[in-house]
Amino acid sequence: MATKADRYEGIDGLKAYAIIGIALMHVLANGEYRMGGFVFERLIPSFTNLVFLFMMVSGFGMCCGYYQKFKDQKISVVDFYKKRYNKIWPYFALLCVLDFVMSPSKSALYEVFANLTLCQGLLPNMNISVIGVSWTLAVIFVFYLLFPFFCFLLESKKRAWLAFICAVIYNFVCSTYFFDESHIADRVAVNFSARTNILYCAIYFIAGGLIFLYRKELAEFASKHKVIAGAILLIAAVAYFALGGNTLTMLFFCVAALVYTLGCTTGGGGTGQSSCQVPRRYQLRDLLVPHGNLSCA
């Protein structure tokens, strides 16, 4: 059984900060606040992109929980999907039903059906208003559906880097071709449609998988050189605002944040036994942002 030192405790804190940031962004976006300055005009609105940090943590966390089990054939596909549905569906279904009861309509009924399957992320241009903020969950669940294939891509570091390069290209062509103005008139709709697509977001999941493959080296480096790791994180944050919130700057920030967090883990993280199982009390903290077990060898 994994010991406490095997668990990347700091990632729970990283997720908490991201949740707070996203909540602040939604409060500001939905309220009528007439406040200016850097904090209210740029900083808090930028927290919307922290959803990509969740995706990277999902890629890393799911590998911690299931990558070796799939390789060793210690878990069946049936058990894996049952756990994903059982963990997410009950509470999410309740939210969808409450939303429909409050605003019933024919279109809402269609959207509730799509939500209840948890396959709405497979829609080519998902634009669901029933629990609309759950688009992130929809994308992450598609990642869950593809996770056995994801493990195949990470079977070797060479293949993982090739998959990452393909994901970079897909992110670019989604932004410049498949979801550009010639296909969708509204620029805001373009940005939203792209980010709700699994191929656009794949770069973050695969980056999380790559960090998993190099977790011991990265955790050791960040643990021994915390000042350097912290400086890199600070540079990444400055670059995000100085150069704009594009994929490259956001990817740089997410990688820097996750690696720095690994270095802050007690004992450097990722050392010890090979078991990836964790006590149930840790799994309960994930709720609707389930990223797998964060305990690894």
Image (cartoon, rainbow, N blue to C red):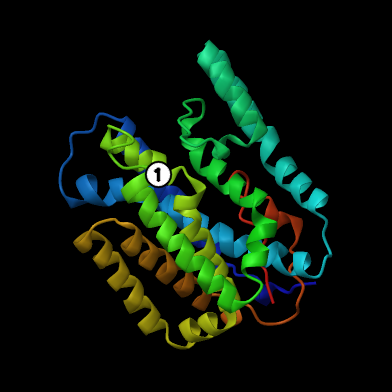
- Residue found at the very far left of the displayed protein: 37
> For the C terminus, which image quadrant?
bottom right
Q: Is residue 243 left or right of residue 203?
A: left
Left or right relative to 297: residue 53: left
In the rendered image, the vertical position of residue 71 relative to residue 120, given as above or below: below
Of the pair 230 and 73, the residue shown nearer to us: 73
Residue 188 image offset from top left, x and y in percent:
29, 37
Q: Could you tell me which secondary element the residue under label 1 belongs to?
A: helix
**Quadrant assignment, res 288:** top right
Label 1 Cα crowd, 10 Å radius (few <14 / some 14-19 / many 20+): many
User: Pointer 1: what residue?
Assistant: 194
* Depth check, front residue: 268 or 237: 237
Residue 289 in sight: no
> Residue drawn at (73%, 74%), measured in percent from left and top?
3
Q: Against 91, is 197 above or below?
A: below
Residue 165 to residue 147: above or below: below
| Residue located 54% across and 21% down the image | 99
The amino acid type, in three-letter code, at marker 1 is Ala
Q: Could you say where residue 24 lies in the image, as x and y percent from the top left?
A: 36, 43
- 251 to the left or right of 147: left
Residue 138 in percent (x, y) is at 56, 41
Q: Quadrant of residue 229?
A: bottom left
127 vs 66, nearest the viewer: 127
Does the image show residue 131? yes
Residue 224 in the image: above or below residue 95: below
What residue sits 77% from the left and 72% below the top? 275
